[in-house]
């Protein structure tokens, strides 16, 4: 038996071996490239976060341990001064902004996406046209949509103010993107506009996998449509929906370009990515910015692990 | 009963109209703005009032903008070509050959595509400076591989898994090597999938902003998104909205047309990348 394991029948063995060898050579270039552009830079970034490297002198950094993250000094008066990212209010402001943005935008996008998908799943004249129309926001580059909405939100000449004034919802022109109270709202509105199509298409794919006769039999039994939605549609579309939600959440947690263009330098919308890049490149606090980007990576990694872990429990629960 | 149905139908179509209006209106308004100049810009209209193409003429005479467009075309197509080249063979191995650790490898490839880009920014910056490609298109081509390659591998793997085994078995019986199987048998079948993934990767590379912003220094090396974000008027306090909208429309129309032509394929590509995961 031992022999058999090492030397399977000659024909299949050489074929199998040839296939495995080919697979190795087919995979090698991709793996090398991915190592160079993903794994190595990630490791270097993490390494930088433990040094005092500066942008102008990339190789002059020295190991300083966790000082970029958290360090404290006790003064002779007995006062303890904390410094480092974890003691930096700007960092926690960015964390809070990012979390708020991700939570609100992803949940609203899920609701709207599901609604649009339900509409597109119905049969009606001009469905192809509607589907083409909702693809437009998705096709527009983020930077371009940020600029278009910045113009629409313009405080003096924007069409949003014009619309809201004419229907009487507001009584004076508002500076949507500059005002600290509404900056986050405008970012969320643009993000919802831009990514609901993606959500809707993924939901639609899930909806179309539900057999039509399920609805037919529910209709014959005279079950109320709303009850059908919550008891039949939602549970069946949930797996597809969850995948879409995780993709969107990961995307929202690393949000950069929309905020950078729509509300530059606003403390109300500064996300973790924005703050980290600011330190890395603009403020010449290269190592400090690396520490922040490493923290963001850790948060996202934790989120993914948590999701996979929870997802497994859910899956086994479904099966039982 | 009929009245109730009519009411229902009207309500449904009202929802449809709202969805279409919200989706299309901002782009429509961008086109509207791009056709206005001077003080016309500061009057809000819902319908075209003038057809003044001077913004388009201005932007097409702007050498830097043309340069940025060419940069973007070169960067996006090279990135996509490299990604597809590496991904076709890799996804054949991932979809068709059983080996230990395949699942783990697929999971790590998916994980890389979910990386926050900022997490590799410092390391990539060092790498790009080290190779000496800072402020050249190659910096973007190298860095965009981080999201185009995992994406194309993932989608092509799901496509290849669905191809019937019989074709491959017949080829093996005829003595075909894996390389011939890929180039002679799978490639012709894969064309639709290659076009879809290529297009999606192209859009991703065309729209990327963070790397393009960080790895370029001079105006002539900018890509389109960076150029649009940085477009400024004659004075610091004056934003040339007409010009920005004309540039936005110019770089978006090709994308929108492509997406509308390939919409069915794109939807299937997106769902292969998403739902089947």
Image: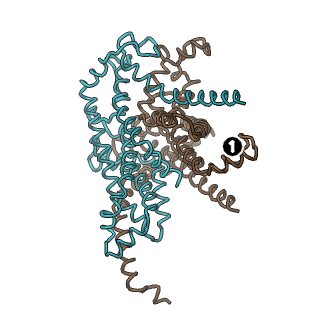
Q: Residue A160: x percent and y percent?
A: 52, 19
Helix, strand or loop status at disc 1: helix
Q: Residue at x 75, y 44 (%)?
A: A223
Q: Is residue B156 above or below residue B141?
A: below
| Apparent colour of chain A | brown
Q: Is residue B165 above or below residue A254?
A: below
Q: Residue at x 36, y 32 (%)?
A: B253
Closer to the camera in the image, B124 or B206: B206
Q: Label 1, on which residue? A: A229
Q: Residues within 10 Å of mark 1 (few under 14, many from 20)?
A: some
- Residue B4 shown left or right of residue A242 in the figure: right
Closer to the camera in the image, A66 or B39: B39
Q: Residue at x 54, y 45 (%)?
A: A202
Q: Quadrant of residue B139?
A: top left
Q: Residue A130: x percent and y percent?
A: 51, 34
Q: Residue at x 55, y 31 (%)?
A: A188
The chain that hosts pointer 1 is A
């Amino acid at each position: 038996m031992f022999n058999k394991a090492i030397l399977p029948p000659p024909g299949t063995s050489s074929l199998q071996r040839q296939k495995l060898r080919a697979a190795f050579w087919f995979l090698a270039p991709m793996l090398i490239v991915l190592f160079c552009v993903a794994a190595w830079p990630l490791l270097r970034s993490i390494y930088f976060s433990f040094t005092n490297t500066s942008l102008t002198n990339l190789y002059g950094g020295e190991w300083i341990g966790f000082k970029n993250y958290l360090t404290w000094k006790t003064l002779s008066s007995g006062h303890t001064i904390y410094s480092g990212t974890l003691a930096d209010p700007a960092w926690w402001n960015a964390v809070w902004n990012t979390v708020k943005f991700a939570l609100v935008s992803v949940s609203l996008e899920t609701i709207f996406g599901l609604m649009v998908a339900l509409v597109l799943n119905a049969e009606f004249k001009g469905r192809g046209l509607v589907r083409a129309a909702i693809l437009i926001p998705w096709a527009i580059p983020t930077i371009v949509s940020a600029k278009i909405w910045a113009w629409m939100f313009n405080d003096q000449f924007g069409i949003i103010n014009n619309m809201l004034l004419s229907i009487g919802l507001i009584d004076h022109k508002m500076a949507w993107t500059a005002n600290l109270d509404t900056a986050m709202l405008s970012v969320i509105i643009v993000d919802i506009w831009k990514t609901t199509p993606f959500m809707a298409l993924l939901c639609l794919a899930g909806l179309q996998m539900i057999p039509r006769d399920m609805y037919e039999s529910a209709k014959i039994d005279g079950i109320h449509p709303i009850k059908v939605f919550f008891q039949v549609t939602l549970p069946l579309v949930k797996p597809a929906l969850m995948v879409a939600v995780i993709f969107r959440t990961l995307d929202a947690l690393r949000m950069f370009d929309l905020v950078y263009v729509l509300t530059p330098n606003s403390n109300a919308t500064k996300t973790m990515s924005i703050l980290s890049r600011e330190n890395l490149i603009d403020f010449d606090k290269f190592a400090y910015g690396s520490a922040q980007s490493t923290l963001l990576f850790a948060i996202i990694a934790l989120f993914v692990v948590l999701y996979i872990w929870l997802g497994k429990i859910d899956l086994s629960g479904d099966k039982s | 009963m009929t009245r109730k149905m009519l009411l229902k139908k009207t309500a449904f179509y009202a929802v449809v109209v709202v969805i279409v209006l919200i989706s299309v209106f901002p782009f429509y308004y961008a086109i509207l703005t791009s056709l206005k100049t001077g003080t016309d810009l500061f009057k809000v209209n819902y319908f075209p009032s003038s057809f003044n193409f001077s913004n388009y003429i201005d932007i097409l005479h702007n050498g830097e903008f043309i340069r940025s467009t060419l940069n973007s075309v070169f960067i996006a197509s090279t990135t996509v070509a490299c990604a597809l080249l590496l991904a076709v063979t890799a996804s054949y191995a991932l979809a068709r050959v059983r080996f230990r650790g395949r699942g783990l490898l697929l999971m790590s490839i998916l994980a890389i595509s979910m990386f926050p880009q900022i997490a590799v920014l410092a390391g990539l910056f060092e790498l790009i400076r080290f190779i000496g490609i800072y402020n050249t298109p190659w910096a973007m081509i190298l860095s965009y591989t981080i999201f185009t390659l995992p994406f194309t591998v993932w989608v092509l793997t799901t496509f290849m898994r669905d191809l019937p085994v019989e074709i491959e078995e017949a080829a093996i019986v005829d003595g075909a090597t894996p390389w011939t199987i890929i180039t002679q048998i799978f490639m012709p079948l894969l064309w639709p999938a290659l076009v879809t993934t290529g297009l999606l990767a192209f859009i991703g590379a065309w729209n990327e902003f963070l790397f393009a912003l960080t790895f370029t220094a001079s105006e002539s090396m900018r890509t389109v998104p960076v150029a649009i974000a940085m477009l400024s008027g004659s004075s610091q306090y004056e934003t040339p909205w007409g010009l920005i909208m004309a540039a936005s429309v110019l770089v978006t129309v090709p994308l929108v047309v492509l997406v509308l032509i390939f919409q069915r394929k794109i939807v299937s590509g997106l769902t292969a990348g998403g739902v089947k995961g």
